[in-house]
Amino acid sequence: MKLAVVTAGLSVPSSTRLLADRLAAATVAAAGSPVEVNVVELRDIALDVTKNLLTGFPSPDLRTAIETVTGADALIAVTPVFTAGYSGLFKSFFDVLDAESLVGKPVLLGATGGTERHSLVLDYQLRPLFGYLKADPVATGVYAASSDWGSGEGALQRRIERAGAELASLAAGRPTVSATPSFVPFDQLLAEVSTQDR
Amino acid sequence: MQFGIFTVGDVTTDPTTGTTPSEHERIKAMVRIALKAEEVGLDVFATGEHHNPPFVPSSPTTMLGHIAAQTSKLILSTSTTLITTNDPVKIAEDFAMLQHLADGRVDLMMGRGNTGPVYPWFGEDIRQGIPLAIEKYALLRRLWREDVVDWEGKFRTPLQGFTSTPRPLDDVPPFVWHGSIRSPEIAEQAAFYGDGFFANHIFWPKEHFQQLIAFYRQRFEHYGHGQADQAIVGLGGQAFIRPKSQDAWNEFRPYFDNAPVYGHGPTLEEFTDQTPLTVGSPQEVIDKTLTFREHFGDYQRQLFLMDHAGLPLKVVLEQLDLLGEHVVPVLRKELDAMRPAHVPDAPTHESLKAATLVGSEA
């Protein structure tokens, strides 16, 4: 299984990356087969994302990142909460993907924030975004507030493990993503429009 | 091998002077540029079609007819004709009329257009872009090939006993190219009919178009029009040329940095590295253009974008002199020498007419 991890944290080290790595590790641990993990740090391609918005095409580095995401069997997407929502960079990256490119893709959603009070960002912002893209988010999303990293009860780790297991299980039941582009033969294209034509 | 220029027809402020041409000045400049193309030995002039400012060419056959009257060799074409929002009956009539006026020096390129509001302005739905292109083009072909057409479809009023006039010159419909930058459906359409496929790759890296063109070639062969390497491919290109490379970079940079399409984004260095844009000496333009053949195979038509981003007419005419005198003759010689004998030229009215005669004698 190929697992892509998109993380939009900006600081180094970043708690967003930390959460992303833990979600990836939990998915790998729960998977029954070997997993190839590829991490896309949006910070590294932030300028390329902006240039793609302006020109309409990706730079070679961004193209590689896009292919990593669209060619994966499962995706983990983690954003920090900035000003009451997902970060602009996170949204911009998904803006430059083809709208059809994540259809049916198993996705695990994650977010980090300074306080617990933003935890519904997962359900009020990330789920609609991936719903529009017709991706397939697992039931458990993981939000980690700063306080979670100091919590002794292991609640965050239990959420991470549950979410990772859900993603591994969902992806395991899916056919592997193929790199070959699909196309519709011409007689079918023609049949879809004309009632009476040669 | 055909060489030519294609124009978007944008009215853009010259960023170095702050001067903006009037629509009238821009339209006259486009005509002057087309005449210059013939003067310097280019083969093709193609104009875009737009229905919103800051673009002026809403009526391509009017402009091309005017140019036809003042030229004798130049092939007049479009980049593109909007098959989605135009009535195919009017396209059939307009371009057949232009064929007669231009004595056959006409072909055209189908495109879907990407300006959202143009669709509803013309009563169509952008989400139906592909089905519109498929159905309307199928009708257009029949209007040119059958004297009397009965037709019924999804997107247009039915036709009973309709004859499109004038009939195509010598009963030879204009050759058609299909332009697309991302849709395999359009490559499939071009392949199905054995029409040309034009990949305007000027704003995109080559890898994307290598896939699309390879797909078109493979499907062209699948449909029995010839071998994959005999498919009819056209490519875009973009250059700013001065005898000395550094002069070209210095002069073009403000136009690039402020251009409506890619300005304020990537640097000129990044853009020339990642796309077909060449800024430099004639030899540099030659070298870069020769890589197109390596990437996409032997091809039939090369069109350059030379007159956008607010470049003044005088500069554009100088560019065409350099293109016609120092770039195209070398490219013509080198590409012709490398092309295997079984790879055809782009069809013209004369070659299609000759093929029809052979076909009817057989």
Image (cartoon, rainbow, N blue to C red):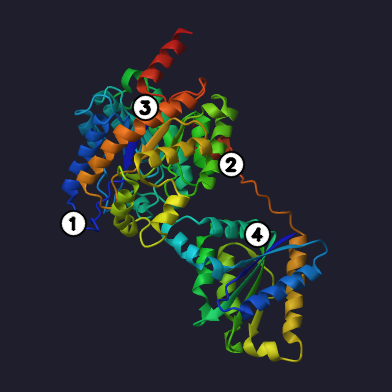
Which tag, 3 or 1, sits closer to the chain's start?
1
Answer above or below: position of A189 versus B128.
above
Three-letter amino acid code at the position of disc 2 = Val
Task: Give the residue drawn at x 76%, y 81%.
Answer: A158
Residues at circles 2 and 1 in contact by the CB criterion of under 8 Å: no
Foreground disc of the pair 3, 1: 1
Q: Is mark 1 on a helix, strand or loop?
A: loop
Foreground disc of the pair 3, 2: 3
| Label drawn at residue A184 | 2
Q: What chain does badge 3 belong to?
A: B
Three-letter amino acid code at the position of disc 4 = Gly
Q: Where is residue B240 in the image (x, y as percent from the top left)?
A: 33, 46
- Per the image, the residue denoted by label 4 is A104
Specify whether residue B153 is in view.
Answer: no
Three-letter amino acid code at the position of disc 3 = Pro
Task: Give the residue drawn at x 39%, y 28%.
Answer: B332
Task: Give the residue drawn at x 35%, y 29%.
Answer: B329
Disc 3 crowd, CA 10 A, few/some/many (<14, 14-19, 20+) = many
Q: Is mark 4 on a helix, strand or loop?
A: loop
| Label drawn at residue B19 | 1
